[in-house]
Amino acid sequence: MAEFIISHAALQRNAELLRRVAREGDVHVLLALKAFATTGCLSVLRPYAAGCCASGLYEALLGAQEMGGRLAVYSPAYEAEDLAELVKIAHHLDFNSLGQWERFAAFCMASPRAQSGEMQFGLRVNPAFSTGKTPLYDPCRPGSRLGIDIASLPETLPRGISGLHIHTLCEQGAQDLIDTFHAFEKNCGFLLRDPSLRYLNLGGGHWITQEGYEVEKLVEFLRGLRQRYNGVEIYLEPGEAWSIHTGVLRARVLDVFESMGFHHAILDVSATAHTPDVLEMPYRPDIFLTEKNGSLCLSRSTAQPAVQLPGENYYRAGQAGEMAFTCRIGGVSCLAGDVFGDYAFPRALVAGDILTLDDMAHYTIVKTTHFNGVKHPGISLLTPDGALTSLRRFDFADFKNRLG
Ligand SMILES: Cc1ncc(COP(=O)(O)O)c(C=O)c1O
């Protein structure tokens, strides 16, 4: 059966670096639950994160129940019923438009936790400074609905507002943050200097745990900000950075055949249902042919997947034509485009082979569906002693119950 496997040790490795950034940069680093919210893994991250960033009521409840710490909520729009719950648990509530703030300001400010200072309110601003490469993930793209347009900003922070929030990055480096902040400072410096400002949230998209990220540059920048805006607390809310290189999706080959000039392999997973970013972004995941010790007659490549099980060998598939057998790797749904891509393997694939799809913890498990009635992969945690602990199995009842 197909399975997402998350590595406890890899989560800890990422978390340690993020905690170091928080300490050395003198900032709060939250976990953005939108990227990774596997309940059974949150206890691994809890000791390292200052709390959570939630996109709405459900993530906020999960964060409050499973993570604790600070809870920062931002949603493109709030429903009144959700706000009535959020004011009981959130520490920051950030609003996407002046209209929503004006509509709910009196209600929010009257709540006991706001009166005691335990909860504060902020505005998301769109600095209109794009540094990203993928329009789907660029909140500063022309016509964006995310954040208040610079031209519509008030001259001073509205009464009751003490926070500013910007989120513009996706899988980006420290210099992109610095450049964005300078643009923000140039256009919105009057708000940053407003005496009511108490917190500044620099959003997510900081690829801090990716190889090559300039961690020292980030820390130096954050320390500089803390000095320049004395008395303003700084928050980062990365999602991916907590969970990149921590998980894989193990799939089985169900069938291999030739059609219309191609070798095809059909897996027991689906790109559209289980790894939708492969089609949406789109991107090409690394795939490893996975064999028990000794049975793979070719040498292993040096690249290895994020999670390796004891006694297994992993052979990284290449680009089409690079090795003996090129095959189109397809999903099990009947969507014509449910294809992971064309990959080359050192030998012909056969039914029953195991393929390991790499780096499948972030923005995958949170996005899965039961589209086409496809079976949902299980979710397991690889603990430091090498044992696999099953966190969740899905069955027909999960499919049936979700659809009403
Ligand atoms: C407001 C906000 N904060 C944080 C994040 C997390 O970003 P990432 O997972 O790229 O670090 C996102 C991602 O879309 C976001 O929209």
Image (cartoon, helix red, strand yellow):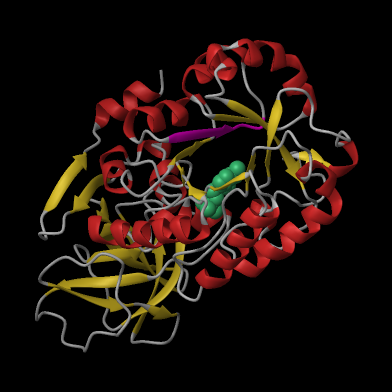
Query: x, y percentage for residue 20?
Result: 41, 61
Q: Residue at x 51, y 69 (%)?
A: 215
The range drawn in magenta is: 70-76
Above/below status of 389 relative to 294: above
Q: Residue at x 62, y 64 (%)?
A: 221
Above/below status of 340 relative to 3: below
Q: Residue at x 53, y 17 (%)?
A: 113
Query: x, y percentage for residue 166?
Result: 68, 46
Is any part of residue 361 visible from this angle? yes
> Between residues 403 and 304, which one lies in front from this camera angle?
304
Is any part of residue 241 visible from this angle? no
Query: x, y percentage for residue 270?
Result: 39, 51
Occupied quadrant, residue 150:
top right
360 drawn magenta: no
> Between residues 373 and 285, which one lies in front from this camera angle?
285
Determine the main secondary structure of the stretch shown in magenta. strand
Q: Specify the quadrant that holds the C terminus.
A: top left
Q: Which residue is drawn at 42% across and 25% down?
A: 61
| Count of numbered marks | 0
Occupied quadrant, residue 164:
top right
> Between residues 228 and 46, which one lies in front from this camera angle?
228
74 drawn magenta: yes
> Between residues 31 and 396, which one lies in front from this camera angle?
31
Query: x, y percentage for residue 155?
Result: 89, 35
Occupied quadrant, residue 183:
bottom right
Above/below status of 111 relative to 249: above
Task: Give left or right: position of 317 versus 112.
Answer: left
Task: Give left or right: position of 79 versus 258.
Answer: right
